[in-house]
Amino acid sequence: MTAADPTAPVPETPRAARGPHAPDVPEDPRAPDVPEGPDVPELPDVPELPDGPGGFAEAGPGPLVLVTSRSFSSGALDLNRRLREAGCRVVRGAPSHDPAELAGPLREAVAWIAGTGPVTAAHLAAAPRLRIVARYGVGVDAVDRAAAARLGILVTNTPGANTRAVADHTLALLLAAVRGVALGNRRIREGDWRPWRSRELAGATVGVVGLGRVGREVTARLTGFGCRVLGHDPLLGEPALRELGVTPVPFAELPRRCDIVTLHAPGGRTLVTASWLATAASPLILVNTARGDLVDEAALAEALRAGRLAAYAADTLHAEHGGAGGPLLAEDLRDRVILTPHVAAQTVEAVDRMGAAAVDSVLAVLAGRTPAHLVADRPG
């Protein structure tokens, strides 16, 4: 299977022969799976709250809670009010975590509800009263957990809160790539109604890299579409993968055996390289709703132009939050690269679940209790 071709129909030809297995690739550990709460009824869209200036927004004697998540309390629940009713002062800070902008709030902050920006040793050293970094989301790779442990600062996350939202977004990007949605959108705006041929998802072979919560939800959706799912996760043995309905495959073998590969692994290292892409039996579709640093973006751009990669659909890039454009933003790749601005988790339901879990952790620590979903505990 390939994405829609902007210049020619996709031929109905059989897949190329598969090559031999290649060595495995190690991955970083993840937090254990936990059950999710009940389904939440659909709610209307709620606009995102504006970012604060990073200075003090409220005065008073209560403990200061610094919030740098862009979408905190922008769902159906008023979580700012919940914190205030608990006696806290709420300060909105720069989502980029610019040290100069956060210097004032960090001096007084007792708790920090952090988004995707980096939480460095320097940030933590500048916060003498800080007791908890409550990560608004699942990934904690941007938090210097070793520095937090040395300083006696707890780190929590919100596992399971955005699982369904990210899985849904993964399928949206995957289908957009398979059916050539970006190409169609551009053409019709230019008055070009020429048709093209794409492929159906049923019968496709899809490789899922990382079978944690999101990977499992994606697998369930792919199975419902009639896909054959191959999986790679060194933290799970072959019997566990087979119980999930997944055929275990070494990471290096996926390009030779798959039509589509979707990434759900922790960040911190590059998995998708030029040499990995070069082993594809036919043009591959790659989806990434995990971390931008999992892929070599320059290698992706080269593979797209060379026809080794049919399409790349992602919710994350190396440069985010207003950073400089990268190689995937080139004009000649616009029909084959589908990007969204790190919004896979941004549903009203997921925003409420993530925010409520982060507030639960903050209030637990302020009350002297151990928070749920503790990622890094006090040393000793």
Image (cartoon, rainbow, N blue to C red):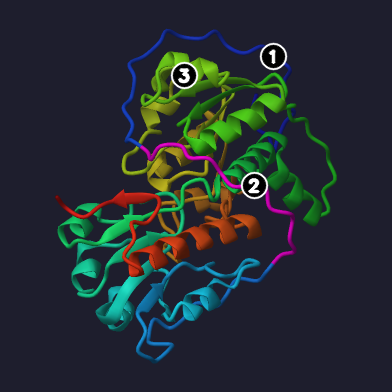
Query: How far across and how far down the image is residue 185, in percent?
Result: 75, 50
Residue drawn 57% across the image and 11% down it: 16
Q: Is residue 44 magenta?
A: yes
Q: Which residues are magenta?
A: 30-45
Which amino acid lies under the numbered mark 3 shown in the image of this protein? Ala
Pick whichever of labels 1 and 2 is earlier in the sequence. Answer: 1
On residue 223, which mark appears?
none
Question: Is there a contact, CB below 8 Å, between mark 3 and mark 2?
Answer: no
Q: Which residue is mark 1?
A: 13
Question: Is there a contact, CB below 8 Å, between mark 3 and mark 1?
Answer: no
- Give the answer, above or below, for where 331 lies relative to 265: below
On residue 240, which mark appears?
3
Which amino acid lies under the numbered mark 1 shown in the image of this protein? Thr
Is 292 placed left or right of 223 in the picture?
Answer: left
- Marks 1 and 2, Cα distance to the nearest angstrom? 44 Å
Q: Secondary structure at mark 2?
A: loop
Q: Using a 10 Å C-alpha cutoff, classify the residue at mark 2 as few (fewer than 14 neighbours), some (14 to 19) or many (20 or more).
A: few
Which amino acid lies under the numbered mark 2 shown in the image of this protein? Pro
Q: Nearer the viewer, residue 275 or 96?
A: 96
Residue drawn 77% across the image and 30% down it: 197
Query: How far across and how far down the image is residue 269, in percent?
Result: 31, 40
